[in-house]
Amino acid sequence: MLSDPSFHPLTGICIILFLAFIFVFTIFGYTFELYLSLGARIFFSLILTAVGGLIAALWRRVRLLEAQISSLRECVNQLEQP
């Protein structure tokens, strides 16, 4: 899995999302006086990161399938030409 070139961008997206959510929970926690513990911030950030990573993975898969469909359409068009 680590040798798959499409794996690395998704890992980077998840790391960026995790750090962004930690930052957001820290800022909003102190702004709105929620004072979430570090464990709670990490837990909520992990959940949101998993959801964001799932959405990013599905989006990448849909784009790949769209490219494959486009390629197959071109092949069918070439076969239909006399």
Image (tube, helix red, strand yellow):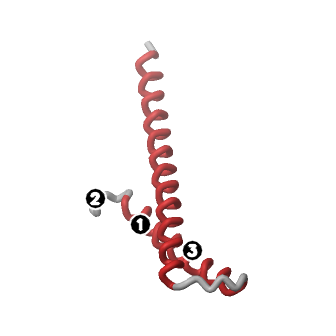
Label drawn at residue 1:
2
Marks 1 and 2, Cα distance to the nearest angstrom?
11 Å
Circle 1 crowding by C-alpha within 10 Å: few under 14, some 14–19, many from 20: some
Question: What residue sits 34% from the left and 59% below the top?
Answer: 5
In x, y percent, where is residue 35?
A: 62, 86
Residue 13 shows in this picture = no
Q: Nearer the viewer, residue 42 or 2?
A: 42
The quarter of the rendered structure image containing the C terminus is top left
**Residue type marked 2:** Met
Q: Is residue 37 above or below residue 5?
A: below
Is residue 45 rendered to the left or right of residue 76?
right
The residue to which callout 3 is attached is 21
Is mark 1 in CB contact (under 8 Å) with mark 2? no
- Please identify the quadrant where the N terminus is shown: bottom left
Q: Amino acid at mark 3?
A: Phe
Is residue 2 shown left or right of residue 42? left
x, y percent for residue 74: 46, 29
Place of residue 19 in the rendered image (x, y in percent of width and height, measured from the top left): 52, 77
| Residue 80, picture quadrant | top left
Can residue 68 be seen from the camera position used here?
Answer: yes
Q: Residue at x 72, y 82 (%)?
A: 32
